[in-house]
Image: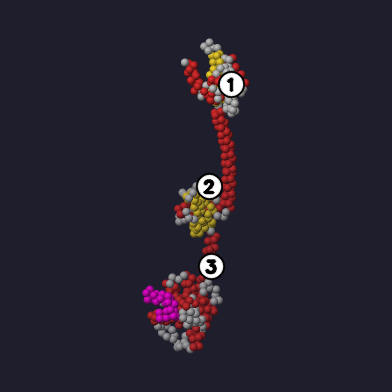
Amino acid sequence: MKSDITEIILENCGLGAIKIDSQARIELWNRWMELRTGKSGESVLGCPLKEVFTDADNSFFDTVQYVLSTGLPRVLSPVFHFFLNPYDSQSKQLVKILPLFDQSADITGTLILIEDMTAHLEYESEIETKAREFKEFGKKAKKDEEEALDWLKQQIQFNNAITECLEEGIIIYNRAGIVTFVNPTADKLLQWSRMELVGSNINVFLSGESRVKDVLNTGESIHSDNELFRRKDGSSFPVSYISSPIILEGKIKWGIVTFQDITERKRIEKEINENLERLKKVLDDTVKALSFAGEMRDPYTAGHQRRVTQLALEIAKEMSLGDNIKEAIRISGILHDIGKITIPAEILSKPGRLTEYERIILQGHSQVGYEMIKAIDFPLPVADIIIQHHERLDGSGYPNGLKGDEIRLEARILAVSDVVEAMSSHRPYRPALGVEKALEEIERNAGTLYDEEVVKTCVRLFREKGFTLE
Ligand SMILES: [Fe+2]
């Protein structure tokens, strides 16, 4: 019974099992052995071990003999190569040789147990290889990391070198408005130390109305020349800045503002503006002096040029014309009859009708005015407007008989204003005819002598908007 159970166990233990007697003849050859060697139990039972394992190393037989003679168990090396069959050159076995005793403790044989270690050893070797690979990988990763850090350091040094030599201050802040980067120029301009500024709120140097941080909400860059930044001591200075969002993965992460101190630029701009204003005033005074000189020669038309200018400017305003046109009308209005300065006083103040000769002399005033004014380098076409102020749409005017659009719009406006003012006022050769008569005159000749649009505007000013000549 005991023997049956032992044999069942040996059949199913997953090991090779060979039982030999004291003469090393095979008594048991389990299925595992049959499968691995291709030799059936029947063919080997009773055979001496040496005849079955013809290829086995001598050390195997010596060890079996040792166990048989001493009764001491032995284990062959864990990587013992035991040729189970002629084609087997790779498998490795753990071979245990155990002594068997009878009841009198005499050695009756041995039990040889063979465990195939190939898969186990291969697994171990694989683990060893993997471990070596991981070690190599670790070394490489460390090297890569060191290289990446070196590269990063170089980039930072490069960026610092760039930001340090720039004349613009650069400040980067996060979405909470906390400053995270300050370049040396920003330090210098704001007079904060970098250590103080980093970690502070950007508001410490912005004015209450500053638009710098708007970029965090809009995502759009802003350029401004009209803000003041505050220094540490509370004083302010004008800056020109560009504020931009820094967008990562589609989200606004930081804001960056680059700025310059434009105190000097603003000072020069102010100086230029003051000089320009002074020059404008000198020009204005000169124009008025010229106009006054003209009116001194012709007391009956004193104030005529001022009133014509007043009406012409009102028409230009009502027609929504640009500033340059209005300025050209203002200057040429005040000077339009300056050419009369050369006309003899007898003709200017003659109470009766003029002779043909006198009329020709008088009509020369627009050409003379042009010659006088063209010498002045006005930035506006003043001389051209003056020479055209007696031209008429149908070509019946003087001195050049220009027609329609050949006459400048400013001159067409002056012409209407000139006629209305002249007819409304007293003249040496006739009493004042009144505004209504003047308006009827220009309405009657709108489109033939006078510009229709200008006439309509002029009439509307008087009849609907309550305009009066002063
Ligand atoms: Fe005139």
The mark that comes first in sequence, 1 or 3, is 1
Give whichever of discs 2 and 1 has the lower sequence position. Answer: 1
Residue 210 position (above or below residue 277): above
Q: Is mark 2 in CB contact (under 8 Å) with mark 1?
A: no
Q: Does the numbered disc 3 mark a residue whose Cβ is under 8 Å from ligand 1?
A: no
Q: Which residues are magenta?
A: 443-465
Q: Amino acid at mark 1?
A: Val
Q: Is residue 368 above or below residue 135?
A: below
The answer to which of marks 2 and 3 sits earlier in the sequence is 2
Using the image, tell me which numbered label, if any, was put on residue 52: 1
**Residue 205 appears anywhere in the view:** no
Give percent across and percent down for residue 82: 59, 24
Question: Is disc 3 placed on a helix, strand or loop?
Answer: helix
Q: What crowding class fits label 1: few (fewer than 14 Cα within 10 Å), some (14-19), or many (20 or more)?
A: some
In the rendered image, which residue does mark 2 sit on?
195
Q: Mark 3 belongs to which amino acid?
A: Asn
The secondary structure that dominates the magenta segment is: helix
Q: Is residue 453 magenta?
A: yes
The residue under label 3 is 275
Type of amino acid at the residue the image marks with label 2: Met
Who is closer to the viewer here, 328 or 154? 154
The residue depicted at 58 percent of the width and 17 percent of the height is: 24
Give SS at disc 1. helix
